[in-house]
Amino acid sequence: KGKRLALLRDAETRTLDGVPIALHANAESAADIAQARACGAAGIGLYRTEFLFLQRREVPDEDEQFLCYRDLVLGMGGLPVTIRTLDLGADKADSSGLVLDDEENPALGVRGVRLSLRHPQLMRTQLRAILRASAYGPVRVLVPMVSAAEEMASVRHLLRDCARDLRSAGHEIAENVELGAMIEVPAAAIALQGMIRSLDFVAIGTNDLVQYTLAVDRNNDQLANLYDPLHPAVLKLLAQTIACARRAGKRVTLCGEMAGDRRYTALLLALGLTDFSMHPAVLLEIREAIIGLDCAAARAQAKALLRAPTRERIGRVLARMGTTP
Ligand code: PEP
Ligand code: MG
């Protein structure tokens, strides 16, 4: 299998019927970046910045963050890189002192963009570092845990402010750095229509979207059987999000674990997805799956998938499409 997949390193990612699909990598270390390059990733679709802040007492300063993001951009050799702003919360082990540790419900607490906006100086520092890295290659900014349009308006405002300050201080930064939202809270998926015009792109985070839609803790082993990406409610939100972004002409990526699991590849093509981001270790496997799938045939099953009332019936449609869920 290793040899078979190795042959796909330089292959284009197209479905049987010729539809180009972009396979990006999720990354958070130099090793991930090297692996992403080695398997011919189209770019970094999700760069998690939490590791810079975890397991340390002091928050990294602007220069330290800048050097890290610059190395990432240079490491990708001109391919686009999507850097996610800090997604810290009491759900992650942390010693930075930023996180409230007395929350009863950390997953529903001060997490992601909520935490960043409570510490505008922290967010400014990160945005400045990202903007400075944009002088070295194409960079996009992605915001986690968005639940309302106002949050994105605040981030947009901060981003513009930081860009203006950097330019007037003589820093060279890219003309336009795109700003996108993670769609991982059901509210963001449901209300996307009202927010899409103010976004440059969206990235669907199914790890959290499944957790919040089904009210099932993604880390609770007792509930593993209920944590199901094939729940009809999840499929509806995915379909709706992808369709909304496509209608608005905005790029939509899916960067949760689902993107790297070939049991779901045909399903995601059926729902209209053309941009995937996954751990680089599984990228070639997904490329192989896509090369063997007919996109038009998959899309023809979208209605049947969305009409199916139970997980079991969805499984039957997927079986007809040639995947065993
Ligand atoms: C997600 O929620 O799907 C996601 C990609 O983000 P994380 O796993 O970092 O929460
Ligand atoms: Mg998430």
Image (cartoon, rainbow, N blue to C red):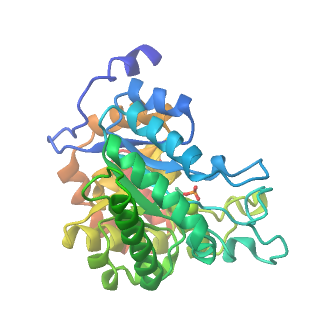
Residue 265 seen in this snapshot: no
Q: Residue at x 75, y 67 (%)?
A: 99
Q: Is residue 227 left or right of residue 30?
A: right
Residue 225 seen in this snapshot: yes
**Of residues 223 and 260, which is closer to you in this image?**
260
State the residue lying farthest toward the front: 169
State the residue lying farthest toward the right: 102
Q: Position of residue 120 (x, y in %)?
A: 57, 73
**Of residues 221 and 313, which is closer to you in this image?**
221
**Of residues 217 and 34, which is closer to you in this image?**
34
**Of residues 315 and 291, which is closer to you in this image?**
291
* Quarter residue 86 falls in: bottom right
State the residue lying farthest toward the left: 18
With respect to residue 253, does 294 lie above or below? above
Name the quarter showing ligand 1: bottom right
* Quarter residue 109 falls in: bottom right
Q: Residue at x 74, y 66 (%)?
A: 98
With respect to residue 304, does 321 lie above or below? above
Q: Position of residue 117 (x, y in %)?
A: 57, 75
Q: Residue at x 51, y 79 (%)?
A: 147
Q: Residue at x 65, y 65 (%)?
A: 226
